[in-house]
Image (cartoon, rainbow, N blue to C red):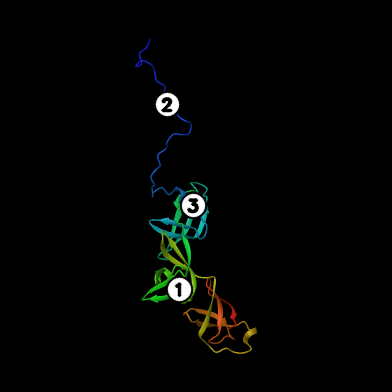
C-alpha cells in the first residue's frame, strides 16, 4: 500500500480560454494604427515627419522601367507654410497626422495674436499671424471659422468657402456697365483686394470665394 506521500496528485484543470494575459503597456512609439501607405497619398493628406505636420499638395506615382516604384510628392508644412519636394518608396508606411477641427468665433486681437472663442464653453484659443497665414485677409471679428489642431495644439484656420464683406475703396461705379463684363480692383473691409464688376461702389457688400479670391455676387442689405 502506497503512503499518502506516494499518491500522485492531479494537477488542477484549466478551463479552456481562462489563461490570464497581462495587459501590454501603452507604447507611444507604436504608431501602426496611425500609419498610411505612400500608395494612398491624396491631395490634402496630412502626415507627420520629423515632429511636424505636412500636407500633400502634389503627388505622382512613378513606375520606372528598371528599379523600384516610388511616389514623388510636394509637401507643405502646416505650421510654417514652407514647401519641400520629397520622394517615398511605393508602399512606404509613414505616420499619418490626424487633425481635429473645432468651430470657433474670432472675437478680438491682442497684440499680434488672434483670439478665438468656443461659444459654448467660452474657452479661448490663440493663434499667431503666421499660423493664420493668408486667411487674415478675409478674417473679421465675429466670424466663425474652423480651427485645425494636432495633438491639442492649434495649427491653422480654415475659413468658410465664401464670406460677405463690404467694399471700402474702389473707383466710382458707372451705371450701364453691367453688361460690359469689365472689372476693377476693390479693397474690402478686411484689407483684401478682389476684382469686382465696374458698377459696384463703396459701401456695397459682396460675396467672395475665399479659395480663389473670386467675386461671387452682390449681397442685398
Residue 146 in picture, x, y percent from top left: 48, 67
Asked if residue 106 is positioned above or below residue 63 in the image, the reply reads below
Mark 3 lies on residue: 38
Q: Nearer the viewer, residue 105 or 193?
A: 105
Task: Give me the C-alpha separation between circle 3 and circle 1.
Answer: 36 Å
Q: Residue at x 49, y 52 (%)?
A: 38
- Mark sitting on residue 206: none
Identify the residue shown where x is 46% and y is 64%: 148
Of marks 2 and 1, the one in the foreground? 2
Q: Residue 151 appears in which quarter of the rendering?
A: bottom left
- The residue indicated by pointer 1 is 106
Q: Earlier in the sequence, mark 2 or mark 3?
A: 2
Q: Are marks 2 and 3 in contact (CB under 8 Å)?
A: no
Q: Which mark is residue 12?
A: 2
Marks 2/1 in contact by CB < 8 Å: the verdict is: no
Query: Total marks drawn?
Result: 3
Q: State the image coordinates of residue 61 (x, y, percent, origin top left).
A: 52, 53
Which quarter of the image is occupied by the N terminus? top left
* Location of residue 81 with respect to 49 vertically, above or below: below
Mark 2 lies on a secondary structure that is loop
Image location (x, y in percent) of residue 105 = 47, 72
Above or below, 83 relative to 26 = below
Question: Residue 202 in the image: x percent, y percent?
Answer: 53, 87
> Extreme top residue here?
1
Is disc 3 placed on a helix, strand or loop?
A: helix
Mark 3 Cα-neighbour bin, 10 Å: few <14, some 14–19, many ≥20:
many
Amino acid at each position: 500500500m502506497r503512503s499518502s506521500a506516494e499518491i500522485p496528485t492531479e494537477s488542477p484543470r484549466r478551463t479552456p480560454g481562462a489563461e490570464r494575459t497581462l495587459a501590454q503597456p501603452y507604447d507611444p512609439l507604436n504608431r501602426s494604427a496611425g500609419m498610411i501607405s505612400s500608395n494612398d497619398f491624396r491631395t490634402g493628406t496630412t502626415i507627420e515627419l520629423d515632429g511636424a505636420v505636412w500636407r500633400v499638395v502634389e503627388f505622382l506615382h512613378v513606375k520606372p522601367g528598371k528599379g523600384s516604384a516610388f511616389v514623388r510628392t510636394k509637401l507643405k508644412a502646416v505650421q510654417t507654410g514652407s514647401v519641400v519636394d520629397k520622394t517615398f518608396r511605393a508602399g512606404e508606411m509613414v505616420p499619418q497626422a490626424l487633425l481635429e477641427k473645432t468651430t470657433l468665433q474670432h472675437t478680438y486681437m491682442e497684440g499680434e495674436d488672434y483670439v478665438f472663442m468656443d461659444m459654448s464653453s467660452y474657452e479661448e484659443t490663440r493663434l499667431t499671424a503666421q499660423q493664420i497665414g493668408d486667411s487674415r485677409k478675409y478674417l473679421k471679428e465675429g466670424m466663425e471659422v474652423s480651427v485645425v489642431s494636432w495633438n491639442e495644439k492649434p495649427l491653422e484656420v480654415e475659413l468658410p468657402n465664401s464670406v460677405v464683406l463690404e467694399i471700402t475703396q474702389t473707383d466710382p461705379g458707372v451705371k450701364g456697365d453691367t453688361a460690359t463684363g469689365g472689372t476693377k480692383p476693390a479693397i474690402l473691409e478686411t484689407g483684401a483686394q478682389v476684382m469686382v464688376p465696374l458698377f459696384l461702389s463703396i459701401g456695397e457688400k459682396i460675396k467672395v470665394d475665399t479659395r480663389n479670391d473670386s467675386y461671387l455676387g452682390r449681397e442685398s442689405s
